[in-house]
Amino acid sequence: MKTSSKFVEDIQKAVQNGRLKEPFRAADIKVSCPGWSDRTYSSFLPKHRKGNLGNYTEYFLQHPDGSYSLIEH
């Protein structure tokens, strides 16, 4: 089973090697990081955005247009 930290690693690697440009949307990640469930692509970004209400680890900054960027850790 794949883990959420692996998903974040896949996104980070895709940004680093230029396959994924920031800011990005779930559909962009699906193209750049294939192999995850559709639910992962659609729910992971908002769940782990800065200021999320679930107190989940913050990996992304959500922009006013709804796109996201990685938060540097």
Image (spheres, helix red, strand yellow):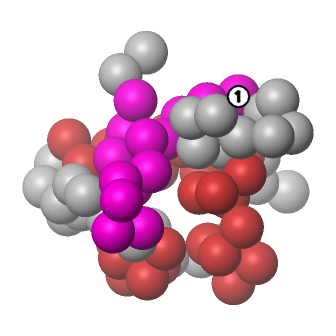
Q: Is residue 15 left or right of residue 3?
A: left
Asked if residue 60 is positioned above or below residue 72 in the image, the reply reads below
Magenta stretch: give its range. Answer: 57-71
Q: Is residue 55 magenta?
A: no
Left or right for 1, reference 39? right
Residue 23 appears at what percent x and percent y? 25, 58
Q: Residue furthest left?
A: 18
Helix, strand or loop status at disc 1? loop
Q: Is residue 4 visible?
A: yes
Q: Residue furthest top?
A: 73
**Position of the N terminus by quadrant:** bottom right
Q: Main secondary structure of the magenta part?
A: loop
Label 1: how many Cα within 10 Å (few below 14, some 14–19, many 20+): few
On the image, numbered disc 1 is attached to which residue? 57
Asked whether residue 61 is drawn in magenta, I would say: yes
What type is the residue that disc 1 sits on? Answer: Thr
Q: Quadrant of residue 29?
A: bottom left
* In-front residue for pair 59/14: 59
Q: Position of residue 4 (x, y in %)?
A: 72, 45
Which residue sits at x=33%, y=68%? 65
